[in-house]
Image (cartoon, rainbow, N blue to C red):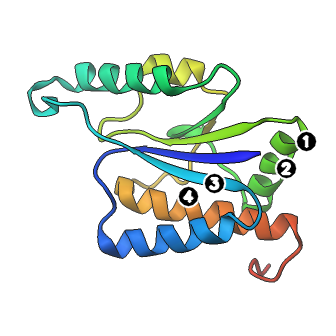
Amino acid sequence: MKLSFWSIGKNNEPYIKEGVEEFTKRISKYFKVEWTIIPVPKNAGMMSEMDLKKKEGEMILEWLGKDDYLIVLDERGKQFSSEGLASFIQARANASVKNLVFLVGGAFGIDEAVLKRADHKWSLSQLTFPHQLVRLVLAEQVYRACTILKNEKYHHK
């Protein structure tokens, strides 16, 4: 199974980039993994929030394969414990999912069409985080889930 992390916005700031790269490298010991930073559409500053979300949504839906399993990070989604995330990832692997896509939306959230296409909605927290920080937390939590699945020492409980 491949893990694809997609995020709309700017490239990572250096302090985020280092952490994301480190956890991505660690995840690659368990799964094929890649990041795609989706640039904000041209003329985004002149678009309404709704039009911007719609344009971002169209791009995402174009890029998705029909068999991709889409997990959107959304404040209204289901929260997991670390063990629960590990079980969720393992269940997708057991179901022979080929590409598990984790999507971090743009500044104004995720378009309704993408939310409807999503196979799962996941909330990291009820708190609001900067999108770049979400990338780091996402990478760390997926790495933690991988170590839980292999019964390795990283996760302490």
Q: CA distance from mark 3 to mark 1?
A: 18 Å
Q: CA distance from mark 2 to mark 3?
A: 15 Å
Residue position for label 2? 90
Q: Earlier in the sequence, mark 3 or mark 1?
A: 3
Residue closer to the observer: 37 or 102: 37
User: Which quadrant holds the N terminus?
Assistant: top right
Which label lies toward us, 3 or 4? Answer: 3
Element marked by disc 4 = helix
Amino acid type at mark 3 = Val
Residue position for label 1? 94
- Callout 4: few (<14), some (14-19), or many (20+) C-alpha neighbours within 10 Å? many
Which label lies toward us, 3 or 1? Answer: 3
Amino acid type at mark 1 = Asn
Residue position for label 4? 138
In the rendered view, would you say 71 is above or below 117?
below
Element marked by disc 1 = helix
Amino acid type at mark 4 = Leu
